Amino acid sequence: MTCRPKTAACRALVGFLLAAVAGIAGNPASAQVSFDPFLTVGGVPEVIDGDRIAVDGRLIRLYGIDAPEIGQTCRTGRRRPYDCGEAAQAMLRRLIGPNDVQCTVFSAPATMDAMVGRCRAGGADLGAAMVARGWAWRLPSLSDRYGREQSMAQARRRGVWSGTNVPAWTWRARQQAE
């Protein structure tokens, strides 16, 4: 990249680099923390829905998945309607159980309503567990994770795969259109 000194972008870049060098020279440990893209959050979670939890006052969306929304209707194999969002929320609560969670957060809430992170409880990846049990869809647009788990859940007709369902992103788009 060529930096033209009279541009605002170049001045901002130079200022950032000078601040970074000053920070490293003054206190290397604190400088590293300020540039580390990941944040670890842990503690007792509050389950918001099937793919979001609150930990230590921070709202975290589970990375790589999308769960049904509260109020979203799915149908069983016998065509009976049920709130699959509430079912997904209940499954996430069961998966966490009495355990604390540990989340590695990848992004800040500047672009979304929540941070995005990979969370574990009792040693299990909560995103993988939700997809494997059929209570969340993997998000191939965001990650290549959880494809195997989703294929197995579909084949075994677990969770939303036991009947008919519409992915949460399609359901939300329809709700916004109405």
Image (spheres, rainbow, N blue to C red):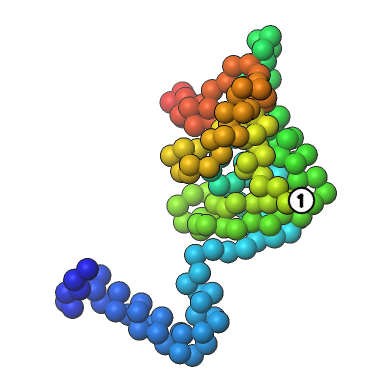
Residue at 78 percent across and 39 percent down: it is 94
- Residue 135, by quadrant, is top right
Residue at 58 percent across and 31 percent down: it is 150
Position of 20 compared to 6: left or right? right
Position of 91 compared to 169: left or right? right
Residue at 59 percent across and 16 percent down: it is 164
Q: Does 174 sit above or below residue 81?
A: below
Crowding at dot 1, Cα within 10 Å, few <14 / some 14-19 / many 20+, comes out as some
Count of numbered marks:
1
Residue 65, percent across and down?
56, 40
Residue located beneath label 1 in the image: 122
Residue 114, percent across and down?
55, 51
Residue 112, percent across and down?
49, 49
Residue at 50 percent across and 69 percent down: it is 36
Is residue 147 shown to the viewer in this render?
yes
Is residue 7 shown to the viewer in this render?
no
Residue 124, percent across and down?
70, 47
Frontmost residue, 25 versus 149: 149
Q: Amino acid at mark 1?
A: Gly
